[in-house]
Amino acid sequence: GSFVTEEDIDMADYSTSNNTLDCTESLCYPDGNPESSYNSFGVMQGNGFAYYALDTYQVFWRCVFTDEGTEKLNPIVNPNGDRFKEDVIDMATQNENIKEGYDVW
């Protein structure tokens, strides 16, 4: 399998900003388990201020999750087989629409 290192992720420097939030155990990883993390205030099922490092590709200067990345994340944060939030589930459909858009541009 592949592993992500700190060198693989480029983060903006917000160290001088007064308007930022940091992931703490209580905000992003409560109870020490991934399922609680996905539903935490920080991650909030993809609508929080934090998310996971997944494999992506670039479309119009935005990072879009690959289907493979989403498929690997699902059983980790969703061990009981409950469905991902609809906007995350629909990522596969969104990816297909974006891929079709490449033929137009």
Image (cartoon, grey):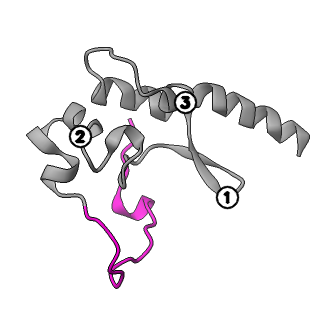
The secondary structure making up most of the magenta span is loop
* C-alpha gap between disc 2 and disc 3: 21 Å
Magenta stretch, residue numbers = 1-22
Left or right: residue 104 versus residue 79 is right
Point out the tag, 3 or 1, that comes first from the N-terminus.
1
Q: Position of residue 58 (x, y in %)?
A: 65, 51
Decide: is 45 above or below 78: below
Q: Which residue occupies the extreme right position in the image?
A: 104
Q: Is residue 8 rendered magenta in the image?
A: yes
**In front of the other: 67 or 86:** 86
**Kind of residue at disc 1:** Trp
Decide: is 89 above or below 40: above
- Give SS at disc 1: loop
Please give the residue where the numbered disc 2 appears in the rendered image.
Answer: 37
Could you classify mark 2 by the number of other residues whose Cα lies within 10 Å: few (under 14), some (14-19), or many (20 or more)?
many
Q: Is residue 7 rendered magenta in the image?
A: yes
Residue 14 found in image quarter: bottom left
Q: Position of residue 82 (x, y in %)?
A: 33, 16
* C-alpha gap between disc 3 and disc 1: 18 Å
Please give the residue where the numbered disc 3 appears in the rendered image.
Answer: 67
Please give the residue where the numbered disc 1 appears in the rendered image.
Answer: 61
- Residue visible at 32% across and 46% down in the picture: 43
Label 3 vs label 1, nearer the camera: 1
Decide: is 81 above or below 30: above
Cβ atoms at labels 1 and 2 below 8 Å apart: no
Q: Position of residue 37 (x, y in %)?
A: 23, 40
* C-alpha gap between disc 1 and disc 2: 28 Å
Label 2 vs label 3, nearer the camera: 2
Q: Position of residue 38 (x, y in %)?
A: 29, 37
**Kind of residue at disc 3:** Asp
- Residue visible at 26% across and 15% down in the picture: 80
Left or right: residue 97 versus residue 75 is right
